[in-house]
Amino acid sequence: MTKSEMQDAMSKVPAITLGFWIIKILATTLGETGGDTVSMSMNLGYLVGTGIFLSLLVVLVLLQIKADRFKPFLYWATIIASTTAGTTMADFATRSMGIGYTGGSILLLACVIGSLIAWHFSLGKISSDTIVTPKAEAFYWITITFSQTLGTALGDWAADTGGLGYIGAAGIFALLLAIVAAAYYWTSINRVVLFWAAFILTRPLGAAVGDFLDKPLDHGGLDLSRPLASLVLTAAIIALIMMLPQRAGHHPKASD
């Protein structure tokens, strides 16, 4: 077994495939409907919702770090926890703190950049392929959580402040994802940069789709039941995890 094959076998993150991105988009949509279910439908508020989902996220990240290999259901449960926590945290920052979608997006972008800079200075590189050490995993999940939160704020900013509406916002972010995919196949742009760009962009896409499903008709949504939409999305994610190949594998190569 080559060194690269040994690193892939040790990695606790999944291979980047089309199936990965499909599940990721569904997970981000679930994050929006699930977060709204707790904070709005259950009337617990953004702060309590954030406390619930952050607590769950911490537990799952600790389990993920403790795991000795890639475990698909544990990994995706942690992703979903990060995206639901991102929903309530972004809503708390932009609405309860009163800084608005623009201010929230700028603040959260700074958090993502700061996390990546700290990761690089601490470990000497930013990696998204061989996530095998506890320190690398901690930076991985911190960056993911900030990116999920940023994505929520960006989706709301595009739909509301930008005046695009939920469908328009979803279309814009889908187009941006297509551009990133084209850059991956037809340019030599750093693969880690493209991975994190795509990872961030899937979140506002999911946020816009989730809002379209559950927001009232007079706000441009379909006014579907948030709990029901969340259950359907959960069932779809579980089915895809079971049907699609789930293996530890190679993310884009690390950036020195």
Image (cartoon, helix red, strand yellow):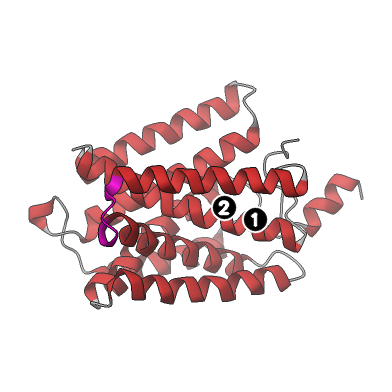
* Relative vertical location of residue 208 with respect to residue 79 in this rendering, above or below: above
The reply to whether the magenta stretch includes residue 57 is: no
> What's the residue type where badge 1 is placed?
Phe
Label ID, residue 139: 1
Residue located farthest toward the left when viewing the structure as drawn: 218
Residue 18 position within the rendered picture, expressed as x and y whole percent measured from the top left: 54, 45
User: Is 111 displayed left or right of 26 in the figure?
Assistant: right
Q: Residue at x 24, y 38 (%)?
A: 168
Q: Residue at x 62, y 25 (%)?
A: 189
| Among the 4 quarters of the image, the one containing residue 163 | top left
Label ID, residue 159: none
* Relative vertical location of residue 170 with respect to residue 146 in this rendering, above or below: above
| Among the 4 quarters of the image, the one containing residue 177 | top left
Q: Residue at x 68, y 40 (%)?
A: 252
Label 1: how many residues lie within 10 Å, few (<14), some (14-19) or many (20+)? Answer: many
Can residue 134 be seen? yes
Residues at circles 1 and 2 in contact by the CB criterion of under 8 Å: yes
Residue 103 position within the rendered picture, expressed as x and y whole percent measured from the top left: 33, 45
Can residue 30 be seen? no
Q: Secondary structure at mark 2?
A: helix
Mark 1 and mark 2: span between their CA atoms?
A: 6 Å
Residues in magenta, as a range: 95-101
Residue at which label 2 appears: 143
